[in-house]
Image (cartoon, grey):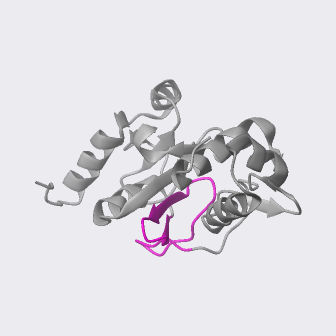
Amino acid sequence: MTSIPEQRREQILTWLKDDQLLRIDELAQRLDVSHMTVHRDLDALAEMGLVEKVHGAVRLPDPHKVTTDTCHLCEMPVKPRLQFVITTQSGQTLRACCPHCGIMLLALQSDVAMALLRDFIYGRIVNVRQAYFVVECRVALCCEPSVIAFATKQDATDFQQGFGGRVLDFAQARHTLKEAHHCPEED
């Protein structure tokens, strides 16, 4: 299929949304790679807290499971439902407690390989740059201003109609947070 690790890992997460549990053998066959390559990809995803390896297979973690990880930016506990995970090109994993901290942390990184978060409603894994955000709504789950992530613009709009705030794409959310924190824009 593909030999680019980030693409394989995103594909594995996509398949897990539908199948809930996938065997290592099946993944190797679907991806047309070795079992060791699948194990390396799953180890990286498991280190980010995005999957759980079980004997001979992999599944999505329970989104309600309590974690002891702390935010790389504000040091608050990282809750699975709000987590934002950045993987650098050097393989370092940075976790943020919420989309607010995640977007701010992302702005500080120059070597990002992958940035993923969870959709607030369904818990699906979403590429940060494809997500939509409700900013400054009445629901304050973590840091301020409140930033809540959604996989689709329609879900963000539906949430915004009930709880206020503004629906923004990634670039708009990043700009809004930089203004809120009085950060200079990049050249």
Quadrant that contains the C terminus? bottom left
Residue 58 quadrant: bottom right
Question: In the image, is residue 45 above or below residue 169?
Answer: below
Q: Is residue 60 left or right of residue 171?
A: right
> Toward the viewer: 22 or 176?
22
- Residue at 55% x, 55% y: name it: 5
Question: In the image, is residue 6 above or below residue 86?
Answer: above
Expressed as whole percent of the image width and height from the top left, the position of residue 62 reads 76, 55
Question: In the image, is residue 69 above or below residue 169?
Answer: below
Q: Is residue 18 left or right of residue 135?
A: right
Question: In the image, is residue 42 above or below residue 19?
Answer: below
State which region is magenta: 70-96
Expressed as whole percent of the image width and height from the top left, the position of residue 13 reads 65, 46
Q: Is residue 129 visible?
A: yes
Q: Is residue 61 left or right of residue 149?
A: right
> Toward the viewer: 37 or 128?
37
- Residue at 43% x, 58% y: name it: 113
Residue 51: in magenta span:
no
- Residue at 40% x, 43% y: name it: 129
Instruction: Identify the main secondary structure in magenta.
Output: loop
Expressed as whole percent of the image width and height from the top left, the position of residue 169 reads 36, 36
Expressed as whole percent of the image width and height from the top left, the position of residue 120 reads 58, 43
Q: Is residue 97 left or right of residue 61?
A: left
